[in-house]
Image (spheres, rainbow, N blue to C red):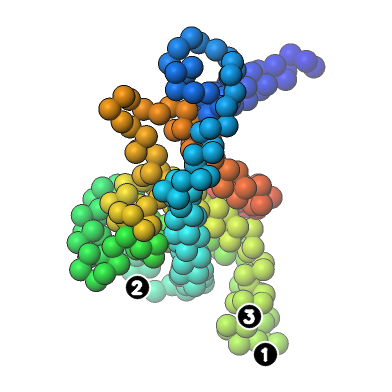
Amino acid sequence: MRAKWLVPTLYILFLMLPIYWLVSMSFKTTNEILGNFTLWPQNPTLENYRVIFTDPSWYMGYVNSISYVTLNTIISVSAALPAAYAFSRYRFLGDKHLFFWLLTNRMAPAAVFALPFFQLYSAVGLFDTHIAVALAHTLFNVPLAVWILEGFMSGVPRQLDETAYIDGYSFPRFFIRIFIPTIKAGVGVAAFFCFMFSWVELLLAKTLTAVAAKPIAATMTKTASSSGYELGLLAAAGTLTIIPGAIVIWFVRNYIAKGFALGRV
């Protein structure tokens, strides 16, 4: 019995090793990191975290990232819900082609759209704003959310819609009070993936911001100096970037499990 748990345990430890190493480095000075090889901090320090929590250029990076990621998640899921319903319930000319075209946006690299977005947002005055990054990320997240939600909606019998109409429900009332709660697992899964893809995306977020909306990933690049990288500070910032994702995973963990069983995940 013990033998069958050995391989999974070793595999999990192997996966957790980079995270442990990152956290361990965050409590070290750069000199200690570059010095002798150690499995844990020999002289633990909180200086790296003190810098992040006291320097506005650092902690505002997290505020900016969370702001545009939250905006993007709300916009993407809100736009994807009616679109996914249309694809799951109606058949119209070119529906398959339109659905495939949406997915091709997810397949395209972000670098393709960086320059057009930069010129467009500079012209209309949206450059270096949270909404600029949030809207740019919808190009990739809306197709993903539509694809996920359509799979969940197609699994809901059409008789539910017909029964609600017979009972006198208007479409908005039926959609909000009956249909969305029925597919709440799919909404949770779609919101999770939109959040995570927007959180880890760097190219567009860095291209479309300068100071006011600069994300933490772009802020982390300033640790380079003439003397090299401030590795301890960089490790502390990297450790803190894991926390929002871990919190989101904790709240939607049950929905993700259902997504693997029922939806397109």
At label 1, the amino acid type is Gly
Rendered image: mark on residue 168: 1
Residue 95: give x, y in percent of width and height: 38, 68
The relative height of residue 22 versus residue 204 in the rendered view (above or below) is: above
Give the residue displayed 72% in from the left and 20% down from the top: 5
Mark 1: few/some/many CA within 10 Å (<14, 14-19, 20+) = few
Quickly name the residue at label 2.
93
Disc 3 is placed on an element classified as helix
Determine whether, in the image, residue 203 is placed left or right of residue 60: left
Callouts 1 and 2 close, C-beta under 8 Å: no
- Name the amino acid, label 2: Leu
Q: Nearer the viewer, mark 1 or mark 3?
A: 3
Residue bearing mark 3: 174
| Disc 1 + disc 3, Cβ < 8 Å | no
Q: Are marks 3 and 2 in contact (CB under 8 Å)?
A: no
Residue that sits furthest to the top in the current view: 36
Q: Position of residue 191 (x, y in %)?
A: 54, 57
